[in-house]
Amino acid sequence: MYLADRSAPAGAKTPLPPDGGPAPGRRRAVAPAVLALGTVSLITDVSSEMVTAVLPLYLVAGLGLSPLGFGALDGVYNGVSSLVQLTGGHLADRVRNHKLIAGIGYGLSALCKPLLLLAHGLGPIGLVLALERTGKGLRTAPRDALISLSTPAALQGRAFGVHRAMDTAGALLGPLAAFFILNAAVGGYDAVFGVSTCVAVLGVLVLVLFVPSGAAAPAAGPAPAAGTAPGRPEAVDLRAAAGLLRLPRLRALAVCAALLGLTTVSDAFLYLLLQERTGIAEQWFPLLPLGTAAVFLLLAVPAGALADRVGRRTVFLTGHALLLAGYGLLLWAPRWPVLPYLVLALHGMFYAATDGVLPAAVAATVPARLRGTGLALVGTGQALARFGCSLAFGAAWTVWGAAPALAAAAAGLCCCAAVAGFVLRPAAAAGAPDADPGAEPGADGDAARDPAPAPDAGLLPRPPRNPRGHR
């Protein structure tokens, strides 16, 4: 039971949430650990986006790399983290210390920033960028696991929304900081990399000093397998991690996230399409991502809170409908002066309705001891699918042209969203009860079940209140 009955008589005991969190009447709206992790992400994103904003110009104009060389580095920069993410999530579960693995990831990324000052060729720069993205991949799933494990299940949409909003604030501030440094400092690129290093180190210090370790799993967890010492958590191995795919709801989430990722055009292509469609001057092109980020920042928390109230499935699918509307405007709308603002607003709303809602839904289906692995499974599948979409869309643009390629992506997104809406429908509407999302494989291969999951486990809508206010 997640919400106390406000009309309960005096002296009645207030039920505790099954995740071992604080009592409903006394809990904080956002856990201090979430705010601390949001601060770490904000600071780290300022550092990372300072580099990202100047890197294309630095590589092509400063070091004279060819477009082919830059394309190879861009593939490394965006592809490595998704491949490493699964390793980071499983390793954090295995050592039972999510903060430790996240800290290694943040530290590795910070260490790579000053190395950019020393790397001047395609090979060395590619290695440094691969190591930096390895750090990002290591920290993503353990960080999200820390957020979910420190938050009552009924409030996880809001918690992830707060974190994503703070993270996006860093994405806004980073390019602005790089812009001012380039214009104010002598040897602008070196100054950007140096300041970025200092900011990244500050993020690591905040993580070490203010984020709880989260080494111990919550009290409410699966029963230990036979032969496990009392009071000792069950071991996490590859067999248990692979067994997560036997959870029906997690499989559904992973498949739907990958399907939708296959038809989600990358941000860079979307901005190029918008520039081609509206004729935006080149000097304004770098500011297009700031429009998406600003809308994302404003709506991430409200969207997460709405998902907690009306159901994560509804908000998640609505986000993809908004993205589809953005594709439609790019394809068929006249060249209105407000067209760029409308497309960027819809793009930011898409991220607000999906980026934090999906991990909140995954966390509701995965046992606490395998939380990092489960989050990484879905995140890696989605990232690889989006990478595949980028390759396919680039090829389609080259062969067919921009408009037919986008029309094909829009048609694919419409079909995949319809499939996702069917697959993620409420279990009652499917005609059979949904499997327990807390089940996990035990040492003997049988299912050992967690206590009752959150009312809106996965992307199920929350059940209606009864007349007394209980859920």
Image: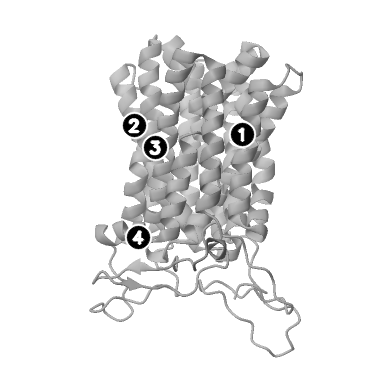
Q: Is residue 426 left or right of residue 294?
A: left
Q: Secondary structure at mark 1?
A: helix
The residue carrying mark 4 is: 246
Mark pair 3, 1: CA separation: 21 Å
Foreground disc of the pair 1, 2 = 1
Identify the residue at horizontal 38%, vertical 50% (top origin). 377
Mark 2 and mark 3 in contact? Answer it, CB < 8 Å.
no
Q: Where does the image place residue 234, in percent across and percent down from the top left?
A: 30, 71
- Is residue 347 visible in this depiction of the protein? no
| Three-letter code for the amino acid on which mark 1 is drawn | Leu
Q: Earlier in the sequence, mark 3 or mark 4?
A: 4
* Circle 4 residues within 10 Å: few <14, some 14–19, many ≥20: some
Q: Earlier in the sequence, mark 2 or mark 3?
A: 2
Mark 4 and mark 2 in contact? Answer it, CB < 8 Å.
no
* Circle 1 residues within 10 Å: few <14, some 14–19, many ≥20: many
- Camera-nearest residue between 21 and 292: 292
- Camera-nearest residue between 70 and 104: 70
Residue 421 - label: none
